[in-house]
Amino acid sequence: MTFRATVLTLYPEMFPGPLGVSLAGRARDEGTWALDTVQIRDFSADKHRTVDDTPAGGGAGMVLRADVLAAAIDHARARNPDAPVIAMTPRGKPLTQARVRELAAGPGAIVLCGRFEGFDERIFAGRNVEEVSVGDIVLSGGEPAALMLLDACIRLLPGVMGAPSSGTEESFENGLLEYPHYTRPALWEGRTIPEVLRSGDHAKIAAWRKSQSEIDTRSRRPDLWERHDGVRVQPASGARREKKD
């Protein structure tokens, strides 16, 4: 089954962009995944190809119209009816590696890229559109976020990554940040590779890596640490929380 990505955008020339090179580009050339772009303006009903209008209730900026978006989504769904429709928006649910894995295991995704002040809210319920955010940031449009989402999916498709274990030892795959990496030279500017990694003892190396993942997650991402399976909820400092009366 080929993973098919359909991107609804006002700027189709932004694709495939970085997805056309390296592993993703080679996988596309080999037919592992396919990309279609749809120009949202093609579904405007007026001669000016208008896709937006002023915000109801007043305010700055412009809002993408629900009727135009719906026509574009309907067109894309007719070509890939089983693919979920995902709108890239900072108001969406944070994207997780678990959701990426679900998408990568499916037939593909229809990705809706916003511009201006965003989407008419009615499109989400009217066309069963999933709202997804790639972080607590605001971009100039949904296209860079769409590239990020698709890259995360494509690298998980069978045969895209060289080593099968490459995808299972990354950050977030097991609920923790990935352990630190080192390579030659063994001594660089007075800094050495940890002795355990040069020991050849695979059991000790595995234990060290697990410990480092836990330490880094606990200090850098206490939110992940608190959600990690089997971990006692503690602040990043390691001190137990005191119950307030």
Image (cartoon, rainbow, N blue to C red):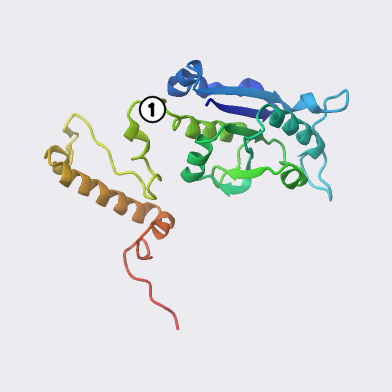
Which residue was labeled with disc 1? 161
Q: Horizontal placement of 48 versus 127: left or right? A: right
Q: Residues within 10 Å of mark 1 (few under 14, many from 20)?
A: some
Give the answer, above or below, for where 99 lies relative to 111.
below
Question: What amino acid is found at the position of numbered circle 1 in the picture?
Answer: Met
Q: Is residue 40 above or below residue 103?
A: above
Q: Give the residue drawn at x 50%, y 40%.
A: 100
Q: Residue furthest front?
A: 1
- Which residue is at 60% across, 44% downward? 132
Q: Position of residue 212 (x, y in %)?
A: 27, 49
Residue at the farthest right position: 46
In-image side of 26 versus 213 (left or right): right
Placement of 95 over or under 221, stated as above or below: above
Q: Residue furthest bottom?
A: 245
Instruction: Give coordinates of residue 69: x percent, y percent.
Output: 76, 35
Q: Quadrant of residue 65?
A: top right
Image coordinates for residue 215, horizontal then vertical, percent = 30, 53
Residue 129 visible in this rendered orientation of the protein: yes
* Image position, residue 167 (x, y; %): 38, 36
For residue 178, side relative to residue 183 (left or right): right
Residue at the image position 21 percent from the left and 49 percent from the top: 207
Tell me the quadrant of the picture where the C terminus can be found: bottom left
Residue sitting nearer the eye, 193 or 8:
8
